Amino acid sequence: MKYAVDTSKRAKDTDERTGQVLFEALPWIKNITGKTVVVKYGGAAMVDEKLRADVMSDIVLLKILGVNVVIVHGGGKAINRAFDALNFPVEFKDGQRVTTPAAMDVVRQVLVGEVNQDLVTAINRHGNLAVGVAGSDAGTIVCSTLNPELGRVGKIEHVDTTYLETLIKSDYIPVVATVGIGEDGGYYNINADVAAGHVAAAIGAQKIVYLTDVDGVYMDFSDKNSLISNMSLREMEDMLASGTVDKGMIPKLESCCYALHAGVFRSHVINGKTPHSLLIELLTDKGIGTTMHSTEEALKYDEHPLGTLASRLAVNN
Ligand SMILES: Nc1ncnc2c1ncn2[C@@H]1O[C@H](COP(=O)(O)OP(=O)(O)O)[C@@H](O)[C@H]1O
Ligand SMILES: CC(=O)N[C@@H](CCC(=O)OP(=O)(O)O)C(=O)O
């Protein structure tokens, strides 16, 4: 009897918590419906198949809520595996993969032929929502050579959003592989963080979310208590200049800065390995990772809409 009482109380607590979570989501859903959100997916957060399927399900949920999601994906780990199998050397300079013309063929096969199609298929299990796009399709991402020492690594010259917008208007989820096209008709390999920032800027996204393998941006990466929940563009630029950020976080933060300067209101860095982190970050009061905002005006624009509603209700009373 004692246990039966405890169980029912526990169940009631859980029901109330579930109700609370759904209630909390309402203003955030109102705020984000009809807006464009670019999700950068890659790295270690992409390796586990079950996790990948869950992230794609969360994206489908956002789409059903009316969010125009555009996925820009990497696949660096899958490229490394393919290089290892072919005995190609894996070499990075300043976070960019040295990409010979032969290596470029492999990068394209892996990113466009495998990773992209796996993500599209994972989404389309829920209905035919996703369309795979190579950055080279329809002249979407046009590149020049970043640095001849890096081979076919692309510097983004231009993003033409015509094809992406056509897909969004028809309610598809574009899934973009970061292979660009050169004026010379050749292909380019683009760092996926960099590409995501440019796509978000060009398409006028409201938000860009980077799913990675850490909980967010740490003030000091060696101190696990220093996770930053919120910072301004200025603070982010100061942090980059201070040299306390290193490894993969540098291209992510540089890409954030680029997108925010270009008019994207918010960027988020969250842990793609935490189940449903995308929904928690975008649809709950507390969020889960690090949020960056461009200006005070943008911060106000994106503030909790219940604040306004609550004051209106008070006046009406
Ligand atoms: N200040 C910092 N806060 C968070 N992560 C940091 C920081 N400085 C460096 N990093 C590193 O950045 C990594 C994420 O970048 P990266 O490995 O390129 O991610 P992805 O593969 O998801 O693109 C983290 O795993 C961490 O090792
Ligand atoms: C030029 C360059 O470095 N391109 C990257 C593209 C993939 C990528 O960025 O993937 P992640 O997001 O998973 O790291 C590469 O070849 O690994």
Image (cartoon, rainbow, N blue to C red):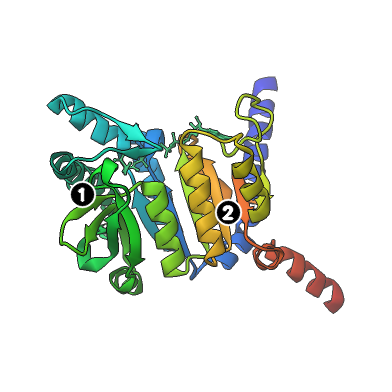
Give the camera-side residue of 315 and 46.
46
x then y, percent, for residue 263: 55, 67
Residue 228 placement, left or right of 249: right
Q: Is residue 132 above or below residue 300?
A: above
At horizontal 68% and vertical 62% (from top left) the residue drawn is 299
At horizontal 30% and vertical 38% (from top left) the residue drawn is 97
Residue 39 seen anywhere in this rendered image of the structure: yes
Mark 2 and mark 1: Cα distance apart in space? 31 Å
Q: Amino acid at mark 1?
A: Val
Q: Is residue 97 above or below residue 166?
A: above
At horizontal 19% and vertical 43% (from top left) the residue drawn is 114
**Which residue has dot 1 on it?**
112
Residue 155 placement, left or right of 314: left
**Which residue has dot 2 on it?**
283
Q: Residue furthest top?
A: 2
x then y, percent, for residue 168: 35, 69
